[in-house]
Image: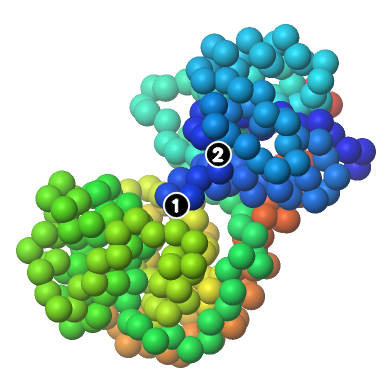
């Protein structure tokens, strides 16, 4: 494949230090494209910077569209992760990272989802699973802690309240990352959080985040919504830590029962899965995640879609 000039568009500042799934995906995609020899232009708000990429500053969708229209001879394709209408009239592909509202129409014809479930719910068939840089998640064979909840605590749909209730019910030691006890006033679960079993770590990143992922015997992911993907799930599995998740959204695509975790509906399901989690081979868990959800595989699939768009195809 000949080298391409790719303009990556995002409406948030990158890189991000802690929480920010879309921002991290854009960073990883950019890095992988650069490794493969492609040229990168980052169209993003003031303060953004990615090593090896040009930066065209835009602070609104209108500014992004204006600069892309004016400089379209300087790139081959636009890959949008926000400000999607900025790609109108250009060779462009958009990735939808969230869920559209009922009746909401997508502004450009070529757009992809991030899981099969995500695509099906939006009437699409084209999707690319997110991918992660495998080497950034070292494997850990011997956990030293028990349960981990690692998600945005204040978002009720992420299931912090249920994770806390499960920990209290089954006497698990639970580490909570992604927010504070104060966030439970909105999300629920405040009463259950007042226990010696519960340990809050706040918003974490870097080595502290890796340590929590590596040290856990299992991660709890009792979501109450249709999760489009779930980066934290794959991060956990790459460290060798199995995931116990409700079978909502993309979870049946990410969690392979008895290999990378278990899918659980009832409290009893979670309890049984927690009892048997030591039977899961942590190295096999990592190897499965590395094979199916690497950034190299993700970008390879995007490159194939770039070519289809450049050939004039309208993606289904």
User: How many labels sit on residues?
Assistant: 2
Q: From the image, which quarter does the C terminus lie in?
A: top right
**Residue at (40%, 82%) from the top-left corner?**
217
Q: Quadrant of residue 213?
A: bottom left
- In this rendering, position of residue 43 left or right of residue 13: right
Residue at image point 58% right, 78% down:
139
The structure residue drawn at horizontal position 42% and vertical position 31%, both measured from the top left corner, is 100
Q: Is residue 43 above or below residue 135?
A: above
**Dot 1: element:** loop
Spatial CA span between label 1 and label 2: 11 Å
Furthest-front residue in this view? 47
- Relative horizontal placement of residue 183, taking residue 149 as reference (left or right): left
The residue singled out by tag 1 in the image is 18
**Colour treatment of the image:** rainbow
Position of residue 31 measured from the top left corner of the image (x, y, whole percent): 71, 48
Q: Which mark is residue 14?
A: 2
Q: Quadrant of residue 104?
A: top left
Residue 251 as seen in the image, left or right of residue 284 = left
The structure residue drawn at horizontal position 56% and vertical position 43%, both measured from the top left corner, is 15
Query: In the image, 292: left or right of 267?
Result: right
User: At which x and y percent is residue 7?
Assistant: 71, 29
Which residue of the protein is positioned furthest toward the right in this rendering?
2
Q: Which picture quadrant has residue 149?
A: bottom left
Query: Label 2's element?
Result: loop
Q: Would you call the spot at circle 1 few (<14 residues within 10 Å), some (14-19), or many (20 or more)?
A: few
Residues at marks 1 and 2 touching, judged by CB atoms closer than 8 Å:
no
Q: Relative to 185, does residue 100 appear above or below in the rendering?
A: above
Residue 120 at least partly seen: no
Q: Is residue 40 visible?
A: yes
């Amino acid at each position: 494949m000949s080298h391409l000039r790719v303009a990556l568009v995002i409406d948030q500042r990158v890189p991000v230090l802690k929480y920010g799934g879309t921002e991290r995906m854009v960073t990883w995609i950019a890095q992988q494209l650069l490794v493969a020899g492609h040229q990168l232009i980052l169209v993003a708000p003031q303060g953004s910077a990615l090593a090896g990429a040009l930066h065209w500053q835009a602070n609104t969708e209108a500014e992004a569209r204006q600069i892309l229209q004016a400089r379209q001879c300087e790139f081959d394709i636009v890959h949008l992760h926000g400000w999607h209408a900025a790609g109108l009239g250009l060779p462009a592909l958009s990735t939808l990272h969230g869920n559209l509202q009922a009746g909401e129409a997508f502004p450009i014809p070529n757009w992809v989802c991030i899981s099969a479930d995500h695509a099906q719910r939006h009437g699409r068939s084209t999707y690319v699973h997110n991918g992660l840089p495998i080497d950034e998640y070292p494997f850990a064979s011997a956990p030293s802690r028990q349960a981990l909840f690692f998600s945005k605590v204040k978002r009720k749909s992420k299931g912090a309240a249920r994770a806390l209730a499960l920990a209290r019910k089954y006497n698990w030691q639970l580490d909570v990352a992604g927010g504070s006890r104060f966030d439970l006033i909105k999300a629920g679960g405040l009463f259950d959080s007042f226990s010696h079993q519960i340990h809050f770590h706040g918003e974490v990143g870097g080595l502290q985040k890796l340590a929590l992922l590596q040290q856990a015997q299992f991660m709890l992911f009792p979501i109450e919504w249709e999760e489009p993907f779930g980066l934290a799930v794959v991060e956990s599995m790459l460290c060798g830590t199995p995931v116990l998740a409700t079978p909502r959204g993309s979870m049946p695509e990410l969690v392979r029962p008895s290999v990378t975790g278990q899918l659980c509906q009832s409290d009893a399901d979670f309890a049984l899965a927690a009892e048997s989690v030591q039977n899961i081979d942590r190295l096999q868990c990592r190897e499965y995640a590395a094979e199916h959800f690497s950034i190299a595989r993700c970008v390879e699939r995007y490159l194939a879609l770039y070519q289809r768009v450049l050939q004039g195809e309208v993606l289904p």
